[in-house]
Amino acid sequence: MDKKLFWREFWILWGLGVIADATAAFISKLPVTVLTNYLFIEGYDRHQPWFVGLEAAEIVFEMAIAVGVGLLAARAVGLGAPLLEAWLRGERSYPSLSSLLVPTLLVGVAVGALVEARNLPVLHPNREASRRQARAFVNSPDSAKAMAALTRFTGARTTPASETLYDVAGAISAAPYRLFWISGFAWIFVRIRRAGPGEPSRGILCVAILATAAIGAVFYFASQSAYHDATKWVLAGLSLPRDPSWAVTARNLLNILPWSIGLGWLYTRKGLECTVVASLVAQATEHLLLVYVIVRFFH
């Protein structure tokens, strides 16, 4: 292994990841790391100096682990960031733009469309009744206290420019963790199968992608459950109709699986850089479908 190349790649990916996480935290005014998110839900004030210092240290440490271990595993199984590596080596030959851009755009649009499908009326059978209940609650005496309490969990108000910057930061900060989980699982499964040298089989890569999706789902549902427990007392006076469990489950799965599976597949086929671009395309697609399709025809 070329140690000089490894460390140059490490510092670039680590630096971009740290800046992206810090930017996301600054814009949203919400924690972006596991431990500080847990402490925030438990009621600790994120504006305290010790909390800010802990979050900064956790961002630096988590990103170092994700990038370092992810790069080692990726090199062992033939994955990684091929365009960045070629640039660092000083190579002048790159894959054709169409071979990268076409699948990146297709995956990005598909992911955005699937994620936005969670807002279709069939998955919100009680949408109108919920709106009526919410409007009645807003006009009730309890609403002011509830809204003040909920403001803590909704973060800062954003502008179109800050939302765009937040999306870019999120796309960049997610890449090292994708590098870590998919490459790590692929390396583990190769070792379990005792496969020979070279790139892992498509079956191993598919299992690695699905395992990463499962990990993402566990973290997502755990976070949703924690936030629900933390805010349920605030909305105790708001009695909303309960959607069928299949609709709730489908919405949650559509919110996480397209990202994990679609961008995971793209990473194993075209490299880490393409997943960042596809993520931005997906977010743009999601926004356009929400504004020009969902709101216009279904709301």
Image: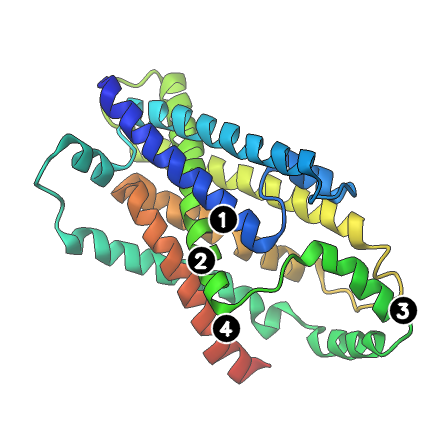
The residues tagged by marks 3 and 2 sit, at their Cα atoms, a distance apart of 35 Å
Task: For marks 4 and 2, give the one nearer the viewer.
Answer: 2
* Residue matched to label 4: 290
Judge whether residue 18 can be spotted in this image.
yes
Q: Quadrant of residue 52?
A: top right
Q: Earlier in the sequence, mark 3 or mark 1?
A: 1
- 177 left or right of 205 in image: right
Residue matched to label 3? 142
> Crowdedness of circle 4 by 10 Å Cα count: few (<14), some, many (20+)?
some
Q: Residue at x 51, y 27 (%)?
A: 61
Label 1 packing within 10 angstroms: few (<14), some (14-19), many (20+): many
| Observer-nearest of 82 and 64 | 64
* Local SS, label 1: helix
- State if disc 2 and disc 3 touch (CB < 8 Å): no
Instruction: For marks 3 and 1, give the one nearer the viewer.
Output: 1
Q: Position of residue 150 (x, y in %)?
A: 76, 59
Residue at (41, 65) in percent of width and height: 284
Which image quadrant: the C terminus? bottom right
Q: Which mark is residue 92?
A: none
- Horizontal side of residue 18 vs 157, given as left or right: left
Dot 3 crowding, Cα within 10 Å, few <14, some 14–19, many 20+: some
Colouring convention used in this rendered image of the protein: rainbow
Residue drawn at the location 16% of the way across and 54% of the way down: 97
- What label sits on residue 165 in the rendered view? 2
In the picture of the structure, the residue carrying the numbered disc 1 is: 23
- In whole angstroms, how far apart are the C-alphas of marks 4 and 1? 25 Å
Residue 62 percent across, percent down from the top left: 51, 30
Mark closest to the chain's N terminus, 4 or 3: 3
Comparing labels 4 and 1, the label whose residue is closer to the camera = 1
Nearest to viewer (mark 4 / mark 3): 3
Query: Could you say whether the residue bearing mark 4 is in a helix, strand or loop?
Result: helix
